[in-house]
Each structure stands twice: as structure tokens, then as C-alpha cells.
Image (cartoon, rainbow, N blue to C red):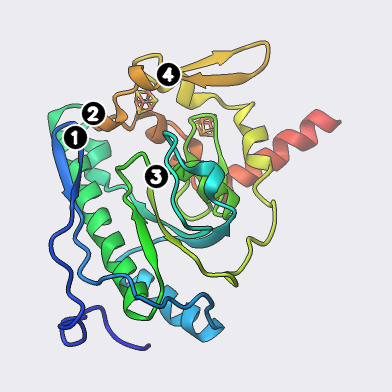
């Protein structure tokens, strides 16, 4: 690997001042970048670079990594950024948030998780900037980009009825962040092998039943679920009931896939 994740010996000339912070529900998540964007950025990567990069991300605690281009349709609230592609990655939600249940304590844990994952995201951005790439951080707590759809397009998994991304390694039990880049030759997502997940959801609906605030409502005729953000206390009180109820969280991806195959075999008889 090219280096470890202590940049201190390398960045004396390019240290940035403290940047602006984002603020959600009175909690701030400052920009902890230490490296300026390069003046003449490069726009392509080698396979060797990506191998080292992914090793670095895994060392930091990232669970899954994917790449995506054509990202502009996922910018939220009319925002626009001069970036065409992104590195998308996930971080597992700590068990303590699930154990404590919705409330002030869960929200404290939730904010700590956002802070740790956010700082990690700035660090990963610094790794790229230091190597000549221009970046912009999409902090996991900021509503700058639709992370679930971005990650789905990147091939990390499929969106379930809870509205959360379900991925093979940790199901819906994840936070997602992204780093916007202008790299032309990032690897493409390989397949649509997660198409069965939304179909399985039609036999399940556990997240809808588990939601204590009717933020998820099933239309029985169309089998679609509507989500009312104003009723959801996931980001204000650390509620994770829809995650805890999900079989992908409780039993794991392979077990659910086996069950899905059995359901389909029965229904085709
Ligand atoms: S986080 Fe809680 S309130 Fe929000 S949709 Fe999930 S179960 Fe419902
Ligand atoms: S709880 Fe069931 S319906 Fe909801 S996302 Fe998970 S698998 Fe889909």
C-alpha cells in the first residue's frame, strides 16, 4: 500500500484552514478537510491505485465501496455541483443504537456515528486530493445527495420498502456517504443482481408494520409504500425500528435469498 492513514508528514504545504460546518438539528458536523483541492487535477485512475485506495478505505472501517457516474440527477434541494462521478461507501450502524431504542440516548449515539463517519469521509477525500484528484464531500448527515439512489445506481444493492438501501454485507444497517469526483474511468457497476430484493419486499412489509409513527404506509392495492419524512424520527431520535424488523438485518442476505427462492418456487407450482 502507498501509505498508511497518517498524512502528517506529507501535508505541511497544503493544509487548509478550518472550513465551514454543516448543522442539523442544532448539531454541527464541521468540515475537517486538511488538504486543498489541487490546482491542476488529474482525471483518471489506474487499477493499482484503486486497489490501494480500497485497502485504505477498508482499514478505516468502510464496509462496501462502489463507483458511479451520471450523478447530477441525485443532487437534492436544487443543488448543483461541478462533478460528474462519485465514490460511494457505507459504514455499519452501531449495535448500541439499536439496543437503546429511540430517544435522546439513541440520538446521541446517532450523532456520534455521523460525526465519526463524516470525519472519515473528509479523511478519504484528503487521500484523493493529496494524490491530485479534485473532490467534494457529501457528508452522510447532509441532504446534498440522495444516497440510497446513488448507491443503488452504483451497484451496492437495491432499495427496499423502507426506502433504505439493502446491500449484501449489512442489509439496511448502514449509513452512506459519497465523495464527488471528476474521474473519467471509474469501474462501472457490474449487474442488476439485486432486482429480486424489491420483489421480496412485496411478501414481507415488516418495516411498515414496525414503524411506530406511521411514517411508512402501505397501499395494499398497488403494494407500494409511501414515506412521510415529517413523521419519521430516525434522524431526530435515532429510531431504527424499520432496520431491526428487516429480515436482511435479522437473518442476513443469503438466508433471505434462499427464502425468496422457496417462495417463488411455491408460487410457480
Ligand atoms: S426510522 Fe423509525 S419512524 Fe422512521 S421510518 Fe423507520 S421505523 Fe418509521
Ligand atoms: S423489512 Fe421487509 S419489506 Fe421492509 S425493506 Fe426489509 S425486506 Fe423489504
User: Could you tell me which residue is drawn at 35 percent across and 52 percent down?
Assistant: 92
Query: What is the spatial separation of the Cα atoms under label 2 and label 1, in whole angstroms?
Result: 6 Å
Query: What is the spatial separation of the Cα atoms under label 2 and label 4, in whole angstroms?
Result: 14 Å
Q: Position of residue 136 (x, y in %)?
A: 36, 59
User: Could you tell me which residue is drawn at 64 percent across and 26 percent down?
Assistant: 202
Q: Secondary structure at mark 1?
A: helix
User: Could you tell me which residue is drawn at 17 percent across and 27 percent down?
Assistant: 103
The residue that disc 3 covers is 173
Q: Identify the image quadrant of residue 127.
A: bottom left
| Crowd tier of the residue under label 4, counting other residues whose Cα lies within 10 Å: few below 14, some 14–19, many 20 or above | few
Q: Earlier in the sequence, mark 3 or mark 4?
A: 3
The residue that disc 4 covers is 228
Q: Earlier in the sequence, mark 2 or mark 3?
A: 3
- Nearer the observer, disc 4 or disc 1? 4
| Crowd tier of the residue under label 2, counting other residues whose Cα lies within 10 Å: few below 14, some 14–19, many 20 or above | some
Dot 2 beta carbon under 8 Å from ligand 1: no
Above or below 13: residue 158: above
Q: Earlier in the sequence, mark 4 or mark 1?
A: 1
Residue nearest the observer in this picture, 245 or 258: 245
Q: Is residue 201 left or right of residue 124?
A: right
The residue that disc 1 covers is 107
- Nearer the observer, disc 3 or disc 1? 1
| Residue 174 numbered tag | none
Q: Position of residue 265 (x, y in %)?
A: 79, 37
Q: Is residue 191 left or right of residue 170?
A: right
The quadrant the C terminus occupies is: top right
Query: What is the spatial separation of the Cα atoms under label 4 and label 1, in whole angstroms?
Result: 20 Å
Amino acid at each position: 500500500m502507498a501509505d498508511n492513514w497518517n498524512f502528517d508528514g506529507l501535508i505541511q504545504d497544503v493544509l487548509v484552514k478550518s472550513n465551514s460546518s454543516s448543522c442539523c438539528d442544532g448539531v454541527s458536523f464541521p468540515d475537517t478537510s486538511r488538504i486543498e483541492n489541487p490546482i491542476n487535477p488529474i482525471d483518471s485512475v489506474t487499477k493499482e491505485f484503486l486497489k490501494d485506495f480500497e485497502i485504505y478505505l477498508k482499514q478505516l472501517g468502510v464496509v462496501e465501496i462502489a463507483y458511479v457516474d451520471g450523478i447530477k440527477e441525485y443532487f437534492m434541494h436544487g443543488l448543483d455541483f461541478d462533478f460528474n462521478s462519485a465514490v460511494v461507501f457505507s459504514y455499519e450502524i452501531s449495535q448500541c443504537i439499536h439496543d437503546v431504542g429511540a430517544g435522546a440516548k439513541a440520538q446521541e449515539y446517532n450523532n456520534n456515528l455521523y460525526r465519526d463517519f463524516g470525519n472519515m469521509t473528509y479523511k478519504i477525500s484528503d487521500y484523493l486530493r493529496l494524490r491530485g484528484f479534485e473532490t467534494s464531500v457529501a457528508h452522510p448527515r447532509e441532504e446534498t445527495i440522495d444516497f440510497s439512489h446513488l448507491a443503488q445506481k452504483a451497484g451496492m444493492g437495491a432499495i427496499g420498502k423502507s426506502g433504505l438501501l439493502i446491500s449484501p454485507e449489512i442489509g439496511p444497517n448502514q449509513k452512506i456517504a459519497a465523495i464527488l469526483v471528476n474521474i473519467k474511468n471509474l469501474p462501472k457497476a457490474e449487474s442488476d443482481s439485486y432486482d429480486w430484493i424489491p420483489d421480496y419486499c412485496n411478501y414481507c412489509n415488516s418495516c411498515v408494520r414496525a414503524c411506530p409513527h406511521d411514517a411508512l404506509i402501505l397501499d395494499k392495492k398497488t403494494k407500494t409504500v409511501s414515506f412521510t419524512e415529517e413523521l419519521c424520527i430516525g434522524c431526530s431520535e435515532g429510531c431504527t425500528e424499520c432496520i431491526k424488523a428487516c429480515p436482511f438485518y435479522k437473518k442476513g442476505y443469503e438466508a433471505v435469498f434462499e427464502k425468496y427462492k422457496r417462495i417463488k418456487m411455491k408460487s410457480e407450482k
